[in-house]
Image (tube, rainbow, N blue to C red):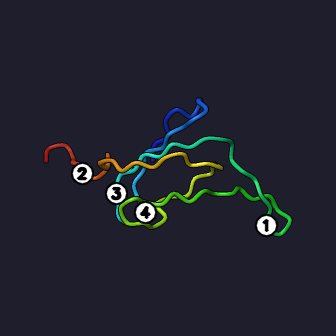
Amino acid sequence: MQFLDCDKPVGRVIFECWHCKQGIVSEFSGEPAMGKYKERPLVVLAKVQCPSCSETAIRLNSPEVLSTTVIASPWGEIKLRGE
């Protein structure tokens, strides 16, 4: 996972789907949303749905996910030196 533009109103995150390993870039905005569970503070997580397999790809601590785009996974084919 790699976060980009964290200092701007709209941030981006590059990640792979937890289920199918599809590369995804999502744009998000806002500060983490806080809720309560059994009278304790709780960060509310937004579920990001994978466009390829329709499963929950990742959960972000952002109140609003603006877009989700499929990309080639930057981690899919990691080769060691000398291969």
Circle 1 packing at 10 Å, graded few (<14), some (14-19), many (20+), is few
> How much space separates mark 2 and mark 1, taking CA atoms?
41 Å
At mark 4, the secondary structure is: loop
- Which of disc 1 and disc 3 is earlier in sequence? 3
Q: Residues within 10 Å of mark 2 (few under 14, many from 20)?
A: few
Q: Amino acid at mark 2?
A: Glu
Q: CA distance from mark 2 to mark 4?
A: 16 Å
Q: Tell me which residue sits at (29%, 48%) in the image.
A: 72
| Residue type of the residue flagged with mark 1 | Tyr
Q: Earlier in the sequence, mark 1 or mark 4?
A: 4
- Residue that carries the numbered disc 4 in the rendered image: 18
Q: Position of residue 75 (x, y in %)?
A: 32, 49
Left or right for 57, reference 40: left
Query: CA separation, marks 3 and 1?
Result: 33 Å
Q: Secondary structure at mark 2?
A: loop
| Depicted 83 relative to depicted 48: above or below | above
What is the three-letter code of the residue carrying label 3? Gln
- Total residue callouts: 4
Q: Quadrant of residue 10?
A: top right
Residue extending farthest to the top is 8
Q: Which residue is mark 2?
A: 77
Which of pointers 2 and 3 indicates the residue nearer the eye?
3
Occupied quadrant, residue 42 = bottom right
Residue 24 % position (x, y):
40, 50
**Residue corresponding to mark 3:** 22
Q: Earlier in the sequence, mark 2 or mark 1?
A: 1
Tell me the distance, in whole angstroms, between the alpha carbons under discs 1 and 4: 26 Å
Give the residue pinned by disc 1.
37
Residue at 65%, 50% (x, y): give it. Answer: 63
Nearer to us in this view, 21 or 49: 49
- Tell me the residue at 49%/36% (across/down): 4
